[in-house]
Amino acid sequence: MKYRLLIILSLLVIIQSFGQDINKIAFTSQGFDEPPTKQGKPLLIVEYKKDDSGNFTATHYLKNNSKKKLENSITIEKERVEVFKEWKSKGVKTFELSDLGISDDPIRDKEKSEAIKTTFSLPENLLVQTDSFSYCQKWKMTKTISTGGYELEMVIYFANNETEKFVFGSNDLGMGLFDLKGYLYSFKLLSEKIPNQVPQYDFFSMDNLANILLTYYKTVECEGYYYNEFIEKNSKRSAQENRMMTGWDFVEYMRQRKKVK
């Protein structure tokens, strides 16, 4: 009986693993006219299909269903796909810069030169915590929106016929609606892999990642405000506990804070 149970569990793991296998990755780019016109801008789609080696390669792109050949094929290496699958299965929400293939230098350089300035100095060790960003962007004091713009999608097609979609609009950051975790997951697959014939091909470039991460660090400064509030409410904490942020969970604190109100 015990062996039968082990066999059944093993089969379930194999089936689940097969079900999470990826057959195709698609990226779509749709621009919007300013002001909107009847004709609209073309829909462009790049499809990366799995080959025998396990890599995902695009040789063409579609422009309003018209097939256009790429000058050079573009390949998403299977190693990237395996990392994406691991992140997805574990529900990874916290990233080191090395996970994203970027150092802190371009972020610090941009902070010195760009219009986006952090109120406080950037921390010594730069981490990206997507839950903190999701909470903080809801409390943005100003919201901005523009006409025109674009909508981008990355769609994952699994072997079990399921799909997973990540959507990004040009107004997401301005409106406090940006899916940072989805962007980082998509970046792992698509960084420097969008053909330059496609509008917004640089959305997943290293330079744009640095811009978005700088916006992240500016946005999550709100956590400092609530941490100070947490310290004031817990006056018996030691100076070392406060300095080391012992017992601090920003997301849980905001959940409890919301319940009290």
Image (cartoon, rainbow, N blue to C red):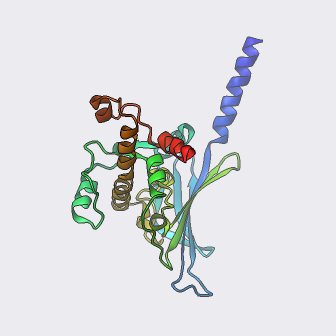
Rendering coords of residue 101 (x, y %): 35, 48
Counting the numbered discs, the total is 0
- In-image side of 119 versus 189 (left or right): left
Q: Nearer the viewer, residue 249 or 1?
A: 249
Residue 220 visible in the picture: yes
Q: Nearer the viewer, residue 16 or 74?
A: 16
> In the rendered image, which quarter is residue 13 located in?
top right
- In-image side of 214 versus 79 (left or right): left
Residue 96 visible in the picture: no
Rendering coords of residue 90 (x, y %): 54, 37
Q: Determine whether 9 is above or below 70 in the image.
A: above
Rendering coords of residue 50 (x, y %): 58, 51
> In the rendered image, which quarter is residue 71 located in?
bottom left
Rendering coords of residue 87 (x, y %): 51, 41
The residue at 49%/66% (across/down) is 175
On-image quarter of the N terminus = top right
The residue at 70%/18% (across/down) is 6
Q: Determine whether 2 is above or below 12 in the image.
A: above
